[in-house]
Image (cartoon, grey):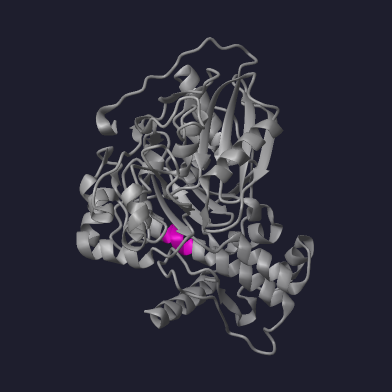
Amino acid sequence: MAQGKLWTCFLRKTTDMTLVAGVDSSTQSCKVVIRRLDTGEVVRTGHAAHPEGTEVDPEEWWVALQSAIADAGGFSDVQAVSIGAQQHGLVALDEDGRVVRKALLWNDTRSAPSANDLIAELGRARFADETGSIPVASFTITKLRWVADNEPDNAARIAAVCLPHDWLSWRLMGYGPVGESPRGPVLDALTTDRSDASGTGYFSSSTNEYLPEFVNQALGRTPVLPTVLGPSDTAGETPDGIVVGVGAGDNAGAALGLGAMPGDVIVSIGTSGTVFSVSRVPARDESGLVAGFADASGHYLPLIATLNAARVLDATRSLLGVDFAEFEKLALAAPPGSNGAHLIPFFEGERTPNLPFATATLQGLSLASYTRENLARASIEGVLCSLAEGLDAVMAQGVKPERVMLIGGSAQNHAVQSIAATLFDYPLEVPQPAEYVALGASVQAAWSLTGNRPEWPIESRPIETAKYRQDVRTRYADTRKHTYQAES
């Protein structure tokens, strides 16, 4: 793998009651699941909150991880663990293993001008060809450039750059700042996987190598970067002898947890919205709509991400002064198209399309359409139309959907399910509610422990088919195009 360092898996003696753990260190919280190796049954879970904001001290994640492990009953009987986490976040370390500054998260858009600078300097075609993606404010490379341009003293201190899951795995294995960790600041012990590395903007998932010139363009030099491991490799062990799996970015972890194969499209409606699919071929989208990421099983994961998803629905529900049950009723009481009211939900800017400074737009209002019912439905249609456009872009990269799986908190909303059936012209399924990133990480833990990828069953329920409403999608697209032109 990258940097020429290969870790072999630990093949341990297992029994029917061998337990493995998976972690999801997301934007909002840390979740832990502990499963039986033989059946995949979840036997214990734990949870801890993360602080809000677009920049966070990584130490907060470490505290939350320890709290979530304790909440899950501890790891004394666990043989292997792996960590999935939010992608892209910049964690910069000095030579003593200390965090140089708060981590800039994926949803911090201050580096949008830095993305434009890097594209101008290296070229869109080169980014697409060598990394599979066009960098936007979310990507690690743009945040690294922002620090170099705006915080030169901090930039000068950077000895290593890693991602949230890389740093947490490193800490779990006992590494960390001088005097604060049993194994000390061994920066060369940092590891990552292809899925997370592919979201940095300076890694090629086709060659499985870093691109030093891209890092140099951002920072002016190349610091220590995590060793990139394969799907069944291990990062090492905790001081207590627990095998630590390779880990993954959150979307790749979710795909692994769902057992997704080529032809499966996953639409996640959480804090952010994502559309991704396991693919045997890499994506190279010079338009920048589709990110050419890698997955956690050795394949690829073409993906689009939106900044505005579940929070749009929650904000609309709050505005209407109703609970979720009443919100569902209101939305389903309005006709498809919301009587002409349509919402472009770019409340926090947007990543796909790349409009970091956009705002939301509500159009088509009349006295007839200006009702609580239409506002509720328009918010759901706006979020889903945005994701449906993302699926179109993913399909343009060669993905041929056979089914679409809806996951995330909002996927459990009956109105969301019903309206999705009118906007996605493919069979829809809703897997049982679960922490799929953490479940995917537990698959990695088992894979690292035994050398074999487990095949644990996932329950899923089909959504009743409905008439496909191209007219609703067309009106949304026309309004979105107008919004884009206005910002341009």
From the viewer's perspective, is residue 330 above or below residue 263? Answer: below
Q: Residue furthest front?
A: 179
**Which residue is at a point 56% across and 58% down the rendered structure image?**
53
Q: Which of these two is toward me, 432 or 85?
A: 85
In front: 471, or 362?
362
What secondary structure prevails in the magenta region? helix
The picture places residue 326, in percent across and down from the top left corner, at 79, 65
The residue that appears at 51% across and 39% down in the rendered structure is 84
User: In the picture, residue 301 is in which quadrant?
Assistant: top left
Q: Quadrant of the C terminus?
A: bottom left
Q: Examine the rendered structure and indicate whether residue 14 appears above or below residue 476.
A: above
Q: Quadrant of residue 189?
A: top left
Residue 138 shown left or right of residue 337 in the figure:
left
Where is residue 125? Give x, y as percent: 22, 59
Regarding residue 239, the answer to whether it shows in the image is yes
What residue is shown at x 48% (from left), y 79% (from top)?
479
- The correct choice, above or below, for 447 with respect to 368 in the image is above
In the rendered structure, does residue 200 fall within the stretch colored magenta?
no
Q: Which residues are magenta?
A: 388-392
Give yes or no for residue 390 being in the magenta stretch: yes
- For the residue pair 409 and 358, the one nearer the viewer reads as 358
